[in-house]
Image (cartoon, grey):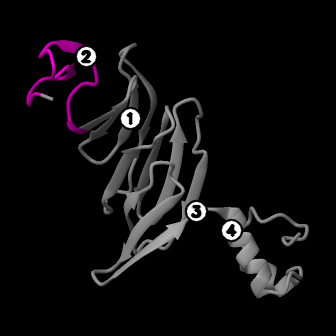
Amino acid sequence: MVEGQPDVRILDVGTGSQVATVPAGDAIVHASFHQRPLALIVRSGGAVEAWNVEEGRRVLGPLVARAEFERRVGVLDEPGRFVVADAGRYRIWDVESPGPRLHVQFDDSLDITSVSGDGTTVIYSEGALYIGVLRLAPAVWRDHVCSVIGRRGFNEEERVGLPPSTPDGPLCP
């Protein structure tokens, strides 16, 4: 990126030649390249866009952030996938899908600081003194919950506190 220039230019550091140009416009604060042809652009204000570098077109976004929270963006190992985390929200996006492939909502105080290459494990902090590791594996969570509740179903009172997407049937196999 060159300050004052409206495009992101991609250079081959080995040859010094320009490989591609992303006509992303101005107000760009960060560009991330990991897997060709995907580039992630973060604009001032935190909006994230995914661009196909080879075609020079935006393929997803802008994904708007909650302004008062810091946002983390990263490209995952699987081509076309990336993660956006802010304000206790963790989403895995695929440039082929209009919505997130995975969306996990945590408390706003949780700050995702790092993500594994496959997106299933996050390192997070809560305040200045606590750092933890969390596996985002619903099957593991389900098995743990089932062992805690004795592999029984939820009663009506317990179901009130569950997310709306929880299936009506039994949770435990």
**What residue is shown with label 2?**
21
Q: Secondary structure at mark 1?
A: strand
Sequence-earlier tag: 1 or 3 = 1
* Residue lying at 88% horizontally and 84% vertically, measured from the top left: 155
Q: Give percent across and percent down for residue 166.
A: 77, 66
Q: Is residue 151 left or right of residue 26?
A: right
Mark 3 — residue?
Answer: 136
* Residue at (71% x, 77% y) in the render: 144
Q: Where residue 49 is drawn, which disc sits there?
A: 1
* Residue linked to disc 4: 140
- Which residue is at the front of the view, 18 or 154? 18
Across and down, in percent, residue 145 comes to 73, 79
Return the disc, 1 or 2, that comes first in the chain's sequence: 2
The three-letter code of the residue at mark 3 reads Leu
For the residues marked 1 and 4, what is the alpha-carbon distance in whole angstroms? 32 Å
Which span of residues is magenta-colored? 2-30
Q: Amino acid at mark 2?
A: Thr
